[in-house]
């Protein structure tokens, strides 16, 4: 069976409880992780080590907190006060953990099961072919000698709308923001990266990315995390929100892809 798991964010003991709940068998089951493996929670190092040890058979996509860890690892950012990443950065196996994480994609698609997994979302104009191509642009830079320079330019909210004519760091930052930070859009498709509330708490001008009209990826079955305030509910076909706020004391959720059944455990 295949299970897609919401943002763990260093809550390793809760992940262990969830895996016991679904009776995870590594010889038969496959875990999908939708990003934000680390940060804010107390056991980021243990989480990263466990998921790395599972092997590449278990897909992982990068979230904004994972990218933040990579930025810290090459001294491209000073870090935030609330970060809980120091144990990874000073671990004896730090270099191999960071090297492993740098190889992870921004998008994972399984043709057989028909699911596409990203951390946050997709621009409304991106079909699957476009999304794969743009994800690979960023992944290639992260995996190259230009990674540190990329991370220095990664932070910021501009440009606020995707345009194929974008170039350089602006282009890569915009792609990264859609994949790893997206929640709400303006009705014309511009990014709004400050609002984090529920579907009912936004202004009239804002819509969730998955409710933008004429979305080119509406037929894709999209798994995503990042937006804990949704509580796992989108009310939109083919969109599966699986971050249920574990690091905020709520729940950690796995969705079995074969029948879309959800399993959750309390974070406390």
Image (cartoon, rainbow, N blue to C red):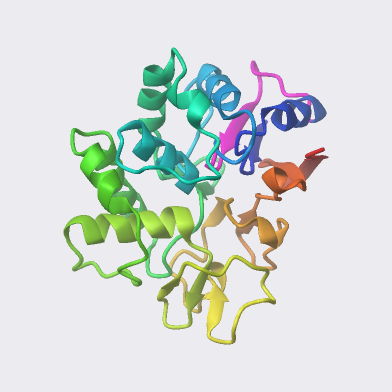
Q: On screen, 40 above or below 134? A: above
Q: On screen, 216 above or below 169? A: below
Considering every residue shown, the one lying at the far bottom of the view is 204
Q: Point out the image quarter for the N terminus.
A: top right
Q: Is residue 24 visible?
A: yes
As for residue 70 lying within the magenta part, the answer is no
Q: Is residue 137 visible?
A: no
Percent position of residue 14, x then y: 74, 32
Classified by dominant secondary structure, the portion drawn in magenta counts as loop
- Residue that appears at 28% across and 39% down: 142
Q: What residue span does the magenta drawing correspond to? A: 22-37
Q: Within the image, what quadrant is residue 204 found in? A: bottom right
Q: On screen, 211 above or below 45? A: below
Question: Considering depth in this image, is 95 or 143 the residue closer to the camera?
Answer: 95
Percent position of residue 13, x then y: 72, 27
Q: Is residue 46 left or right of residue 60?
A: right
């Amino acid at each position: 069976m295949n299970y897609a798991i919401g943002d763990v964010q260093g809550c390793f003991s809760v992940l262990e409880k969830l895996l016991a709940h679904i009776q995870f068998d590594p010889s038969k089951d496959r875990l999908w992780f939708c990003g934000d493996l680390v940060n804010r929670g107390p056991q980021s190092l243990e989480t990263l080590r466990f998921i790395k040890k599972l092997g590449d058979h278990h897909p992982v996509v990068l979230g904004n907190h994972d990218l933040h860890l990579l930025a810290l690892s090459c001294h491209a950012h000073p870090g935030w006060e609330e970060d809980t990443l120091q144990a990874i950065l000073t671990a004896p196996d730090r270099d191999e953990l960071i090297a492993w994480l740098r190889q992870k994609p921004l998008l994972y698609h399984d043709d057989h099961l028909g699911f596409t997994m990203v951390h946050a979302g997709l621009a409304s104009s991106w079909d699957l072919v476009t999304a794969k191509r743009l994800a690979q642009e960023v992944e290639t830079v992260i995996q190259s000698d230009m990674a540190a320079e990329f991370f220095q330019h990664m932070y910021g909210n501009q440009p606020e709308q995707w345009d194929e004519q974008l170039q350089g760091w602006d282009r890569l930052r915009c792609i990264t923001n859609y994949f790893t930070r997206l929640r709400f859009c303006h009705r014309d498709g511009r990014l709004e990266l400050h609002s984090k509330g529920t579907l009912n708490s936004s202004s009239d001008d804002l819509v969730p990315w998955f409710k933008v009209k004429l979305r080119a990826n509406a037929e894709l079955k999209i798994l995503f995390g990042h937006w804990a305030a949704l509580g796992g509910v989108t009310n939109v076909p083919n969109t599966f929100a699986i971050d249920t706020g574990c690091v905020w004391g709520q729940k950690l959720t796995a969705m079995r892809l074969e029948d879309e059944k959800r399993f959750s455990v309390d974070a406390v």
